[in-house]
Image (spheres, rainbow, N blue to C red):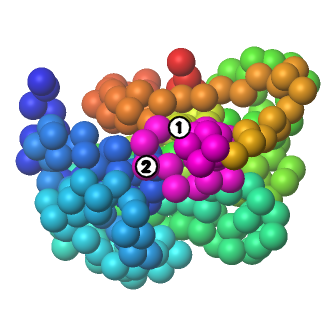
Amino acid sequence: MSEFWRDRSVLVTGCTGLLGNWLVAELLERGALVTGLVRDLVPQSRLYAGEWYRQINTVRGCVEDLPTVERAINEYEVDTVFHLAAQTIVGVANREPLATFETNIKGTWNILEACRRVGGVSRIVIASSDKAYGDQLVLPYSETTPLQGEHPYDVSKSCADLISRAYYVSYGLPVCITRCGNFYGGGDLNFNRIVPSTIRSALRDKPVVIRSDGTFIRDYFYAKDGVLAYLHLAEQMDRKEVLGEAFNFSN
């Protein structure tokens, strides 16, 4: 295994979430020094069930609070940031658009601004989404497809994506952006998603809800594969042609 991550100080926001807990586990396996920004205690998260929380530094707070983010980066001398924290549920975004904008847009600029102010961060990976493209008539989309979200969640990702690019272009911040589809895997606690919802219904001998007429095609990406993609991207960020760019990851 590569020694790239050994003793490297890494900040992970959203570390109690589906992708976040898989990422923390892999970073620890590779010898990284992990700091997690944790807003809420989620005892069912794999971060706690797997007891990885015992091996990381925990900073209590949220990405909407710039001083907390700045302190975490400064005090733990962070080299690499994986910004995964977000409000990710479309239904919640539709009910509470302002809270979604606060988390997904302000939270992203706080991460970037804290890195700019503190300095010393060599790579920042911002988790955007394929939702940043909005509804497209021509599929499949590529990284050059315009960002045109129209609904609250989609707009929040379009904005975060553009802000990340701005911090690279204007300040030379070492940023890359990931755009992935729907993650699935162990530890997904959002049971309004089709994969955990279907599994739970089957286990409880309840009817499985069919959500479409079968004509729609969505991208499903296993969480461990997503983590490996994120790590590979971060490892490539010493290459100048990679910096400031967005990458679609999929099967």
Residue drawn at x 17%, y 46% as measured from the top left: 28
In the picture, measured across the screen, residue 9 lies left or right of residue 212, that is: left
In this view, the residue in front, 35 or 45, is: 45
The quadrant where residue 74 appears: bottom left
Residue 3 in the image: above or below residue 41: above
What secondary structure is marked by label 1?
strand
Q: Position of residue 192 (x, y in %)?
A: 68, 53
Name which residue type carries label 2. Answer: Gly
Asked if residue 76 lies in the magenta stretch, the reply is no
In this view, the residue in front, 106 or 184, is: 184
- The numbered disc on residue 184 is 1
Q: Position of residue 18 (x, y in %)?
A: 46, 49
In the picture, measured across the screen, residue 39 lies left or right of residue 167, that is: left
Asked if residue 186 lies in the magenta stretch, the reply is yes
Name which residue type carries label 1. Answer: Tyr
In the picture, measured across the screen, residue 77 lies left or right of residue 160, that is: left
Question: In this rendering, does residue 50 appear at all?
Answer: yes
Residue drawn at x 35%, y 44% as measured from the top left: 22
What secondary structure is marked by label 2?
loop
Region in magenta: 185-205
Q: Which residue is mark 2?
A: 187
Count of numbered marks: 2
Residue 3 in the image: above or below residue 15: above
- The numbered disc on residue 95 is none
In this view, the residue in front, 216 or 172, is: 216
Residue drawn at x 74%, y 42% as measured from the top left: 207
Q: Position of residue 249 (x, y in %)?
A: 53, 26
Q: Position of residue 81 (x, y in %)?
A: 34, 52
Question: In this rendering, does residue 173 appear at all?
Answer: no
Residue 136 in the image: above or below residue 209: above
